[in-house]
Image (cartoon, grey):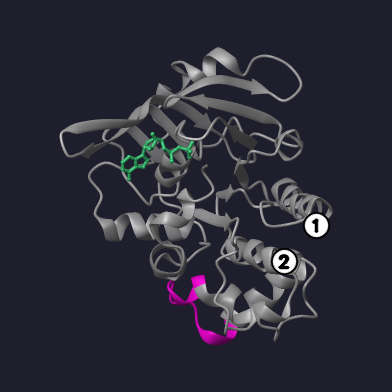
Amino acid sequence: MTDPGGRPVVEAVDVTRSYRMADVEVTALAGVSLRIDAGEYLAVLGPSGSGKSTLMHLLGLLDRPTSGTLRIDGREVAGRSDAELAELRNATIGFVFQSFQLLSRTSAVDNVALPLVYRGVRGRERRERAVAALQAVGLGHRLGHRPTQLSGGEQQRIAVARALVGGPRVLLADEPTGNLDSRTGAEVMALVEQLNAERGVAVVLVTHDETVAARARRRIVMRDGRVVEDSAAGDGTVGDSAVGDSAVGDSAVGDSAVGDSAVGDSAVGDSAVGDSAVGDSAS
Ligand code: ADP
């Protein structure tokens, strides 16, 4: 369910990311161009070290390109302060990780409400929205439970509720089924897909699991820091346009609407999730 008329949620044009290690420069991304529209459902595949985590960091506004142009929800990343990126992240991105990343001593409802704290939403409304999000993932009867009192599948559904509580434009899921048995994993993916269909949230899913990847409607394959394949599920060719120059496209550099948010930057972006969390799915 793309939204060709709307503004893309991701536009990357020849994005690179390299790291300087002593005297050596390591190129993690060697020039990625990619356009993702609202409501897309995209799997990212590729061997360990191919740049998937680096790409997810960039799309999640946890890192910045070394060169190239990256726009998230129409806003150019370059030139923004960390605080501005955190605000954009909070307003636009939801994260779901392999390891759930919930606060273990905090109730389900408070875990889900946390991103809203950082947006200044008042207590009562926070709770109402968190309850609604938990109901949407089928956990309306577990509001007061702490993560340790819940199964892995339930914990991941709480993480999905937290990612979606503020109405993000894109959900970044990094091996979301990696700690779940296959049946529970399939249930979590079905839930993500339902929310993708109902709310038009774009889903970008990194996974090594082919059966999980096969559920997506589009897949990109990375190798050596590049997108080497970009195809609609089932057949050939989102291909050239998406890999190639399409992302340069129009300048849909948006107007205002900083939507609602998902993950409070300090809640998940900084402390609980931190840098490495996006990365650890990788290999
Ligand atoms: P993947 O997620 O596909 O396994 P990564 O994005 O983690 O791949 O890594 C891509 C390449 O960049 C790898 O060669 C990796 O060693 C390198 N790399 C990633 N992060 C860093 C870093 N912080 N410092 C130096 N090199 C890095």
Instruction: Give how far apart the Cα atoms at labels 2 and 1 are.
Output: 8 Å
Check contact, mark 2 vs mark 1: CB within 8 A.
yes
The secondary structure type at the circle numbered 1 is helix
Residue holding disc 1: 184
Q: Which mark is residue 152?
A: 2
Q: Amino acid at mark 2?
A: Gly
81 relative to 165 in the view: left or right = left
Residue at 76% from the left image edge and 53% from the top image edge = 185
Q: Nearer the viewer, residue 12 or 225?
A: 225
Q: Which mark is residue 50?
A: none
Q: Identify whether 20 is placed above or below 250.
A: below
Give the vertical position of 64 relative to 227 (above or below). below
Residue 50: x %, y % from top left: 47, 30
Image quadrant where residue 208 sits: top right
Does residue 65 appear to the left or right of 204 in the view shown? left
Specify few, some or many for label 1: CA neighbours under 10 Å numbering under 14, 14-19, or 20 or more.
some
Q: Amino acid at mark 1?
A: Thr
Among the two numbered marks 2 and 1 on one chain, the one whose residue lies closer to the N terminus: 2
Which of 51 and 193 lies nearest the eye of the viewer?
51
Q: Would residue 61 be seen by someone viewing this image from the given angle?
A: yes
Observer able to see residue 74: no
* Residue depicted at x 63% and y 74%: 129
Q: Residue at x 57, y 35 (%)?
A: 37
Residue range corresponding to the magenta coloring = 115-125
Q: Position of residue 134 (x, y in %)?
A: 71, 72
Q: Locate ligand 1 by image quadrant.
A: top left
Q: Would residue 150 be counted in the magenta stretch? A: no
Q: Quadrant of the N terminus?
A: top right
- Vertical comparison of 26 with 269: above or below: above
